[in-house]
Amino acid sequence: MLEGTVKIFNHQSEVLKNNPLGDKSKREVYVYLPPNYDGEKKFPVVYCLTGFTGRGKMFLNDSAFTPNLAQRMDKLIDSGMVKPMILVMPDCFTHYGGSQYINSTATGNYEDYLTHELVSFIDENLKTIPDRNSRAVMGKSSGGYRAMICGLRHSETFGLICSTAGDAYFDLCYLPDFAKAFRAIKGNPKKLLDKFWDENEKKGKHDFDGLNIIGMSACYSPNGTDFDLPFDLQTGEIRDEIWQKWLKHDPVRLIENHVENLKSLKLLYIDAGTRDEFNLDVGAKIFCERLKKHDIPHIHEEFDDGHFNISYRQNRSLELISQNIEG
């Protein structure tokens, strides 16, 4: 079996310079090049996005029984299931654990970084087909959320969208964790953050819930370079005015304003496990039902599993992308 190669770019971002968290602006971008990449022929491109607390190189982690993304792609190409494509694995990690790949005054302009700066950089430095119909984005969880946002807001750049267990219908995927996050934060978000950055600190049962809500607050309800939590730090009561800010970022609620963008896509694929711990299978159902109401073509699938250890679903996304992408 022929193997592709992985190339690492140290990309100096201009839009991430002087970001409010002081996170590095030079980012490692991992790129998979198919076995027949020779620097002459042009290839379609798939942007692969990790979930919250992830970064691109984690797609290439070594595991005894699970192939990483490069190994997976080699097998898919060798079997003829997937055509040769370039895979781009960006790093959009922040001090809070993630950026949701959107612009925020509290984290930085990660939407501009991914959609404009990085796409241009990749097209300039690799033999790509620089066209929306030859450019896809796929991701899981927060990466799946970003894939949906790309379809909603950036269909001129990405013509193919695949979301696995993407954050949607915030009422069910975030709201149920507010009480757990409240208990973990204990009135002091900074203290919990410091705990995550201290390698000697043992993390508590609901500490990740607290970190997740802090990270989402920085993305959905920034307050200048700070952020507002969606509940009262002393009592846990939901702050409706902040919660409403979150809902403005919910893919389910954004469909109505972006119908034509979604209709223009060559592929819109949504899937989730029927036992997803964050109820994202329900969010996917609701999202797809709204798509139906607007006659937006899409594919909706479910599988018998939860939210974690489901990298095997990458096969299905890559298969569908290969069938629909141009080039």
Image (cartoon, helix red, strand yellow):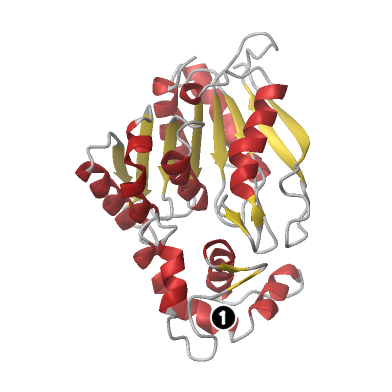
Total residue callouts:
1
Q: Which residue is labeled 1 in the image?
A: 184
Residue 62 visible in this rendered orientation of the protein: no
Q: Residues within 10 Å of mark 1 (few under 14, many from 20)?
A: many
Mark 1, secondary structure of its residue: helix
Q: Position of residue 268 (x, y in %)?
A: 36, 35
Relative to residue 6, is residue 213 depicted above or below?
Answer: below
Is 81 situated left or right of 203 in this image? Answer: left
Q: Position of residue 179 (x, y in %)?
A: 45, 80
Q: Position of residue 242 (x, y in %)?
A: 47, 73
Identify which residue, 256 or 182, lies in the foreground: 256
In the orientation shown, which residue stands out farthest toward the top?
40
Q: Position of residue 115 (x, y in %)?
A: 58, 38
Residue type at mark 1?
Answer: Ala
**Residue drawn 60% across and 86% down?**
187
Identify which residue, 310 or 143, lies in the foreground: 143
**Residue drawn 59% across and 86% down?**
186
Q: Looking at the rendering, in which quadrant would you find the N terminus? A: top right
Relative to residue 1, is residue 21 depicted above or below?
Answer: below
Relative to residue 217, is residue 30 depicted above or below?
Answer: above
